[in-house]
Amino acid sequence: MSFLISSQRTFERDALSEAYYVISDVLGYKVHPLKSRVPGLAILRFNEETNPFRVIDELSQYIHEKGLLVACLKIVPLERLVKTDLSKIVENAISLASVKILPTHSWKVHVRKRQTNLRTFQVVEKVAEKINWGTVDLTTPDLEIRIEIIRDLTGISVMEPQFELSMARLSHNIARKMV
């Protein structure tokens, strides 16, 4: 279990430090940082088996009580972290999807890639062709098969879209509540 943390370029250390402080010191989870070697991205890995979606809920509650994080732009939960290899990505994505996506769910494959030769269409096609249950919904799915490719590491999650913690979206929601 890990989190992909995005920030402005050159602020990766600040974002990682901020996320580490809140998740480790305030919320009490044991984590350690991983370098992504991609500008604007950092990875925070949990030392023990943890439900990253519960941590996202706790982070959201912390942000509503204390205010927005400053250096972090987005925090994306990653249930699996694997070597960037198409067959491993497909295998892990299908493994998670088979447990989480029910025949009544709608879903989509969401791929974000950085510094890799893999093609988005190639990844989406290989994953989607193996899932023959539920329905595809590209606009408002119940679940996303989230694949984050960062050079030689790939993070994979099957999650509800709102579990991507975006400071911009939270800021917008907070501003709307004030009006």
Image: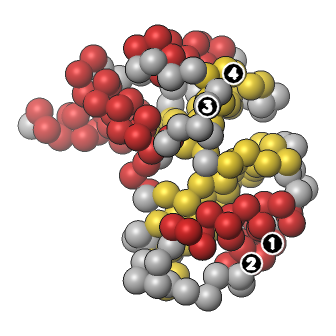
Q: Residue 85, located in which quarter of the rendered image?
A: bottom right
Residue toward you, 92 or 119: 92
- First-in-chain label (4 vs 3): 4
Residue at image location 13% in from the left, 38% down from the top: 177
Disc 2 to disc 4, C-alpha distance: 32 Å
Residue at image location 31% in from the left, 24% down from the top: 62
CB under 8 Å between discs 3 and 2: no
Residue at image location 62% in from the left, 63% down from the top: 96
- First-in-chain label (1 vs 3): 3
Estimate the x, y position of residue 42 in percent, counting from the top left.
Answer: 68, 28
The residue carrying mark 4 is 33
Residue sitting farthest toward the front: 48
The residue carrying mark 3 is 48
Estimate the x, y position of residue 50 in percent, counting from the top left.
Answer: 53, 37
User: In the figure, is residue 78 to the left or right of 161?
Assistant: right
Q: Quadrant of the N terminus?
A: top right
The residue carrying mark 2 is 125
CB under 8 Å between discs 2 and 4: no
**Amino acid on which disc 4 is placed:** Pro
CB under 8 Å between discs 1 and 2: yes
Q: How many residues crowd mark 1 within 10 Å: few (<14), some (14–19), many (20+)?
A: few
Q: How many residues crowd mark 4 within 10 Å: few (<14), some (14–19), many (20+)?
A: some
The residue carrying mark 1 is 122
Estimate the x, y position of residue 120 in percent, counting from the top left.
Answer: 75, 65
Disc 1 to disc 2, C-alpha distance: 5 Å
- First-in-chain label (1 vs 4): 4
CB under 8 Å between discs 1 and 4: no
